Image: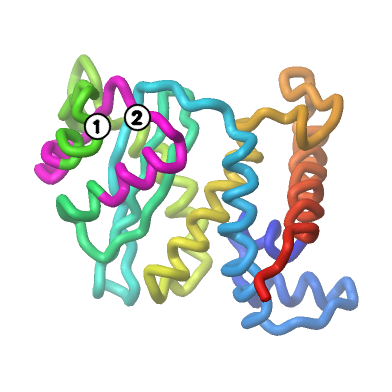
Amino acid sequence: MAVRWYLAHPLSATSVMVFLAKRDIDVSTRTVLRWVQTFGPLLAAEVRKHRRRPSRRWWVDEVFFFRKKAQEKRYLYRAINEEGQVIDVLFRDHRDTESAMAFFRRTLRHTGTGPATLISDYHQPYIQAVQDVFPEATHVRTGLHRAQGETTKPIERSHVPTRDRLRSTRGIKTLETGQRFFEGFEAEQALRHDRITWHALVRGYQHADASPHEHARAVVAALHTLRTRLARMPRAA
C-alpha cells in the first residue's frame, strides 16, 4: 500500500507516513523510502512479464534531472513505442555515446527484440549507438517542432508524468536510487495506462468496458496479485 501510494501519486515519503499513521501503521519516512527502493525494481520485473509485446516503431529521448538545484545534471533515457508503452528506462550520469549504447543494450536484453524504426532528436551519440546495437533499424533523426513528417513529440509528451511526479520530492540523490524509483514508477504507470495483458492478474477484467472506478480497483487487485507472488519468491540466504 505504501509503495503503491508513493509510486502512483505525487506524495512525499512524509505524506505516505502520515496516511499510514491514520490507519494505525507507524513507520518512518526512511522505511517508506526503503520499501520503494526494495520493491520498486521487483515490481517492475514482474510487470514486465505481463506487458504487451511492443511494436517495432520506437521513439527515444533523454530527460534531465538535477541532484541539487541548478547543479549536477543527470539524465533519464526512455524509449516508447507508437502506443505510448514505455520500453525501458535507464538513469545515467552523462549524456554520451556510452550511455546511449548502455540503454539500447538494456532494452534489447529486456525485450528480446529491437526496433525496425527508431526515431530520435539530433543528439549525435545516437548515431553510433543505433549502428552498434540495432544495425538493421532505420534511424530517423528529427525535431520537436517540424511542420510535417516525424517529430519527437510523442516521447516529449511521455516525459511529463515523470517530471510531474518528481516535483513533490527533493530530487534523486544517487544513480542507484534513481534507477530503482524510475523502474517502479514506470511499472505502476504501465498498470494504470493499460500497457499490460490483464487476464493473468485480474480474472475476468475487461478494460475496454470498465469505468474509471473499476479500472482503479483492477490496478489495486493486480498489484495485490504481484505482491503475493513476490512474497512467495525464495529469499537469498
Which residue bears the numbered disc 2? 114
Per the image, the residue denoted by label 1 is: 134
Residue 140 at what x, y percent from top left? 18, 25
Query: Vertically, is 102 above or below 135?
Result: below
Where's residue 149, x and y in %? 21, 15
Q: Is residue 10 left or right of residue 148?
A: right
Inter-mark Cα distance, 2 to 1: 6 Å
> Residue 37, located in which quarter of the rendered image?
bottom right
* SS for callout 1: loop
Judging depth in this view, the residue of 132 and 216 nearest the camera is 132
Q: Amino acid at mark 2?
A: Gly
The reply, left or right, for residue 139 in relation to residue 26 is: left
Residue occupying the point 70% across, 57% down: 4
User: In the rendered structure, are the residues bearing label 2 and label 1 in contact, judged by CB atoms less than 8 Å apart?
Assistant: yes
Image quarter (top left, top right, bottom left or bottom right) of the N terminus: bottom right
Q: Residue at x 48, y 56 (%)?
A: 182
Q: How packed is label 1: few (under 14 Cα within 10 Å), some, or many (20 or more)?
A: many
- Say which label, 2 or 1, has the lower sequence index: 2
The outermost residue toward the front is: 237
Q: Within the image, what quadrant is residue 36 found in? A: bottom right
Q: Depth check: 192 or 107 in front?
A: 107
Give amino acid for label 1.
Phe
Residue shown at 43% from the left, 69% from the top? 176
